[in-house]
Image: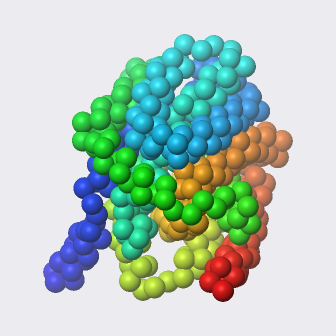
Amino acid sequence: MQALSRAFRFYIDSFSGFRKEVWILAAVTFVNRAGTMVVPFLSLYLTQSMGFTLPQIGWVMSSFGLGSVVGSWLGGKLSDRIGFYAVMVGALLTSGLAFIGLQYVQGFWPFCAGVFVLMLLSDGFRPALFVAIRGYSKPENRTRAVTLLRLAINLGFSLGPAIGGLIITNLSYEGLFWVDGISCFAAAGLMLLALKPQRATEEEKAQAAMVTGSPYRDRPYLFFLFTSILITIPFLQYFSTVPVFYSEVHQLNEFSIGLLLGANGLLIFLLEMPLIKYCEIKGFSRFSILRFSVLLFALSFVVLNLFPVIAFLWVGIVLMTVGEMLNFPIMNRLALDRSDRGQPGAYMALFTISWSVAHIFGHTLGLNLIAYFGFTKTWWFFTAMLLLGTGMLYFAERMMKKGEVATSK
């Protein structure tokens, strides 16, 4: 009983030390993410309702990523010029309209264009959010502040797919687009009511006085981002090709798929914050944590191949989720720290663009590999890619440390 009490106190303490604005940003992110139901089911919607082939779906997902690249770049540039507050509110309002309108788009190329516009509008929010959390969090709390945002995202994600599966089963896919749009409006309203733009402006002025180094000339940072792309491409399969694997190979319905994906968010809600705090207390090397997390990603694909039964789909989700809990907060923290060298909007835009680039190539690559070689060879391919990424993290660490030594001289 005493051990349970200590564990509970440790869990509560892992949420302490944040400013009020950080909690408001987390609440805005939760409201927005809880309504995001279209994306996890997009591959199923395109096959079952739109009649697209797997290669066509891959191109739609590439349009998704390309729009994200342009939107992230624009959001970062505008964040440095007009401030993160205006960018975040504008992105939420316009993307809400775009989500509602997308359900009325018919045809392959028009749908690709619609997805591009949607992501251009919505993903300006991401670099602005990073700039905001960078300004509102203390340096020693940055990793946990990012983790809190991820917690809000994944708590919303744990609700979104499960509710989305019910909406599809009882209503239609089109209902998801309305929920997505309305949730964007609700998040914008919450931000306008709870987070005052005057305070945001003060934070941005302080950040603008910092050094103005360019991330495009920061070679260690660029190599780190390239490595993160190689790692993220296999991870993204869990939200595009793996649901198709669940449906076609294991014959799971939308609700069961929603429960599997929802378990990812629920586990993150329960474990990620204390896990990150534990790693901070133990003083584990950030790059050691990253390498271990990537090995867990690889094991999640190995399980799908070696144990082709439904029970081990849950094992794969758990391995992937633990890897995610360790990987992405540390990746975000390294990028935030690196942004101290220059304009934060530009640095964080490039970081979010790396995620978008992974979207451009990852979904198309996965779906085309499955179409030509099947699921088993595809999972082995992504296992090998993750092992390569693990090795590249060693070089990224050495490059960043060498750069820090050179700067200090």
In the displayed structure image, the side of residue 13 where residue 350 appears, left or right = right
Residue nearer the viewer, 260 or 58 = 58
Q: Position of residue 103 (x, y in %)?
A: 53, 18
Q: Position of residue 83 (x, y in %)?
A: 45, 43
Q: Position of residue 205 (x, y in %)?
A: 42, 52
Colour basis? rainbow
Q: Please report the residue visible at 36 percent of the width from the left and 63 percent of the height from the top.
A: 137
Residue nearer the viewer, 63 or 323 = 63
Q: Please report the residue visible at 34 percent of the width from the left and 35 percent of the height from the top.
A: 187
Q: Please report the residue visible at 62 percent of the width from the left and 43 percent of the height from the top.
A: 73
Residue nearer the viewer, 249 or 321 = 321
> On the rendered image, what quadrant is the N terminus found in?
bottom left
> On the rendered image, what quadrant is the C terminus found in?
bottom right
The answer to whether any part of residue 208 appears in the image is yes
Q: Position of residue 58 (x, y in %)?
A: 72, 35
Residue nearer the viewer, 183 or 234 = 183
In the displayed structure image, the side of residue 66 where residue 186 appears, left or right = left
Question: How many marks do you count on the picture?
Answer: 0
Residue extending furthest right? 372
The answer to whether any part of residue 312 appears in the image is no
Say above or below: 334 vs 60.
Answer: below
Q: Kindly indicate the quadrant of the structure image that contains residue 361.
A: top right
Q: Kindly indicate the quadrant of the structure image that contains residue 386.
A: bottom right
In the displayed structure image, the side of residue 271 where residue 287 appears, left or right = right
Residue extending furthest front? 209
Q: Kindly indicate the quadrant of the structure image that contains residue 231.
A: bottom right
Q: Please report the residue visible at 59 percent of the width from the left and 80 percent of the height from the top.
A: 288
